[in-house]
């Protein structure tokens, strides 16, 4: 590198950061919350407080725990087998007799089903289930008054395995597999998307939200996920050698950038090319990292705030410049494998003549100045404001066709003008792009019954997420939420409210992000407040001890997650689901939604008198004050 190269690259990185500041901050925030990088963000923002299930030290030491950490992720899985259950000596001695396995198996299932229908007062006692008085099955019976889906599932699995330990182990294994798949196909490969966004920001003034899905459009999401999995495994093996891990860290430093430029490249080729490009530059790269130590110290002193809002995106942008420099040198030297670095227009702008040829159809439509027809009538005005279609008509279908055409121009006109990356000039053939991805237009109106179905999809998804998370981290299976059904309405309500109330902000992603934080924060705070006031201070979530929390009902970490999730819902998930729901005939869709609404209403009425409570689900105010006094 030439003299003064670090200052030059940092100056260029600051210029790029100023141009795309808000976008880069959101990209880095998402990386931190996914656990891809900047993992210290969550650690610092969360204060370790003893939970309701915390055991005294002497009791905790009596058992043993298995701790599993997937390489490169921050998801720690703890399956506590010995301390999860406490043997009832009398029942255990009977169950251990030879030839008594079938009797124990049948007795366990009978106890689950019997206790599930017991009175609420009795359910709060320590019942003996499967020869145990603590743990997953006892927690289910003691906490879930109505004995719903989870009890039936636990009973069925116990009947199949004939052992509570095997049943719990199987459930934890399934949850771990699901989280591993999430890590492979989202967390571990997100760094490639992140590097692609930063590289496109170097040359272009705009980065459309659709660029987050570029791997889906070129059918390379699975390939890139497998590539990054192989790289992570190889790095893990090298880390076991300590010295080799340090060296290979810098040898493979450029792999995410290389894969971001050329998703077709294999893991072996990417690692070999990165090693050649970094040959003679490892110490240089280390010193470049070391030059940011002042920013790292400031980030630590400010509880990562300066890191989130400046130094993290600044460092990634700077190393984007570093990669561009090494890439240019590799091509000039005709380094072996450098022909794979073939995305020319990722590092330089195309001439207007080339753009006119590639985007001729778009330019013709731009010249026609296509205008959207206005909606008329009261329902039309409501549709324009909130994005809800109450009745599907021919006029509405015509309007949506015009809207799709208008959206196409909006998405492509910036590329035709050279203001964003020209995807049609990519090394990936245009015909490989997926039509279902192209149809994910976020400037759309949603049919009211589709919104109802989305409510239940997101509510069910939130319930599955929290149940699995609790199963993995605590080793117990509990029915999360105040309701007894398999749904958490706060997830569904928040998602639908974002789509409705923030409809007019969709053309401004950053405003959508900020508004989602405010809206979801208000919904979560008010929901928590009302539940506490109407249920004698019981809490179904508590953020006490989290960084920047308000009365334990909301916190900074949760709000940022809501903002990122809201953006994902508006620009990715909701359009995808809407495309699927539009294929469902109205004669099936409407009765399905009405049935779900009736079941949900019945659950609401029942839960208003008999809310879902228990260990792992709620914490009352008295327990919280006792815990605070201990601290």
Image (cartoon, helix red, strand yellow):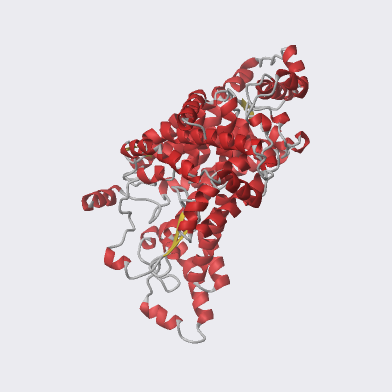
Residue 389 in the image: state x and y as whole percent.
Answer: 64, 27
The image shows residue 399 at horizontal and vertical percentages of: 71, 21
Q: Which residue is drawn at 54% across and 27% down?
A: 509
Q: Where is residue 353 in the image (x, y as percent from the top left)?
A: 74, 18
Residue 115 visible, this angle: yes
Identity of the residue furthest to the bottom in this view: 98
Residue at horizontal 58 percent and vertical 71 percent from the top: 160
Q: Nearer the viewer, residue 557 or 34?
A: 34
Can residue 589 be seen?
Answer: no
Horizontally, residue 13 falls left or right of residue 324, namely left
Residue at (66%, 16%) from the top-left corner? 375
Residue at x 66% of width, y 39% of height = 341
| Residue 166 position (above or below residue 266) | below
Residue sticking out furthest to the left: 629
Relative placement, left or right, of 56 versus 269 is left
In the picture, residue 433 is in which quadrant?
top right
Q: Is 625 situated left or right of 70 in this image?
A: left
Q: Position of residue 266 (x, y in %)?
A: 67, 49
Please tell me how many numbered marks the rendered image carries: 0
In this rendered view, identify the residue nearer to me: 628 or 132.
628
Q: In front: 214, or 242?
A: 242
């Amino acid at each position: 590198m030439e003299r003064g190269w670090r200052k030059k690259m940092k100056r260029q990185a600051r210029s790029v950061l100023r141009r795309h500041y808000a976008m880069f901050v959101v990209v880095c925030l998402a990386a931190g919350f996914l656990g891809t990088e900047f993992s210290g963000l969550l650690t610092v923002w969360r204060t370790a407080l003893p939970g309701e299930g915390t055991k005294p030290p002497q009791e905790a030491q009596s058992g043993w725990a298995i701790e599993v950490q997937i390489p490169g992720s921050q998801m720690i899985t703890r399956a506590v087998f010995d301390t999860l259950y406490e043997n009832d000596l009398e029942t255990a001695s009977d169950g251990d007799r030879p030839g008594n396995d079938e009797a124990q198996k049948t007795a366990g299932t009978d106890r689950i089903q019997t206790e599930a229908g017991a009175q609420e007062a009795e359910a709060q006692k320590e019942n003996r289930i499967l020869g145990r008085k603590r743990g997953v099955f006892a927690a289910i019976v003691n906490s879930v008054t109505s004995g719903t889906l989870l009890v039936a599932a636990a009973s069925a699995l116990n009947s199949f395995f004939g052992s509570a330990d095997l049943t719990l182990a199987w459930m934890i294994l399934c949850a771990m597999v699901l989280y591993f798949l999430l890590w492979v196909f989202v967390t571990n490969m997100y760094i490639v998307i992140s590097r692609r966004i930063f590289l496109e920001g170097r040359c272009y003034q705009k980065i459309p939200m659709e660029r987050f899905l570029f791997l889906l459009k070129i059918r390379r999401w699975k390939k890139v996920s497998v590539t990054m999995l192989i790289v992570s495994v190889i790095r893990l093996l090298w880390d076991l050698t300590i010295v080799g891990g340090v060296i290979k860290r810098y040898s493979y430093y450029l792999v995410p950038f290389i894969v971001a430029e050329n998703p077709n490249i294999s893991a072996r080729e990417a690692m070999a090319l990165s090693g050649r490009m970094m040959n003679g530059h490892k110490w240089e790269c280390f010193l470049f990292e070391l030059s940011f130590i002042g920013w790292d110290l400031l980030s630590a002193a400010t509880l990562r705030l300066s890191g989130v809002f400046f130094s993290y995106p600044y460092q990634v942008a700077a190393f984007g410049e570093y990669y561009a420099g090494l890439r240019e040198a590799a091509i000039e030297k005709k380094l072996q494998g450098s022909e794979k670095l073939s995305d020319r227009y990722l590092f330089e702008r195309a001439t207007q003549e080339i753009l006119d040829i590639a985007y001729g159809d778009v330019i013709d439509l731009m010249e026609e100045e296509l205008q959207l027809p206005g909606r008329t009538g009261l329902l039309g005005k409501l549709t324009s404001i909130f994005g809800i279609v109450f009745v599907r008509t021919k006029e509405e279908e015509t309007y949506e066709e015009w809207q799709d055409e208008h959206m196409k121009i909006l998405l492509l006109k910036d590329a035709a003008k050279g203001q964003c990356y020209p995807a049609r000039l990519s090394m990936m053939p245009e015909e490989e792009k997926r039509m279902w991805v192209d149809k994910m237009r976020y400037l759309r109106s949603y049919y009211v019954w589709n919104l109802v179905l989305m409510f239940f999809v997101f509510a069910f998804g939130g319930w599955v997420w929290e149940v699995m998370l609790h199963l993995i981290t605590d080793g117990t299976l509990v029915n999360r939420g105040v309701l007894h059904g398999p749904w958490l309405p706060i997830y569904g309500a928040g998602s639908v409210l974002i789509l409705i109330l923030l409809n007019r902000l969709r053309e401004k992603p950053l405003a959508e992000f900020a508004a989602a934080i405010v809206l979801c924060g208000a919904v979560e705070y008010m929901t928590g407040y009302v539940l506490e006031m109407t249920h004698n201070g019981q809490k179904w979530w508590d953020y006490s001890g989290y960084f920047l929390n308000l009365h334990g009902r909301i916190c900074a970490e949760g709000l940022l997650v809501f903002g990122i999730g809201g953006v994902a819902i508006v620009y990715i998930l909701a359009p995808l689901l809407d495309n699927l729901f539009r294929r469902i005939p109205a004669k099936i869709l409407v009765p399905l939604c009405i049935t779900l609404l009736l079941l949900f209403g019945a659950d609401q009425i029942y839960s208003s008198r008999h809310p879902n409570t228990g260990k792992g689900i709620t914490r009352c105010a008295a327990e919280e004050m006792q815990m605070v006094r201990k601290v």
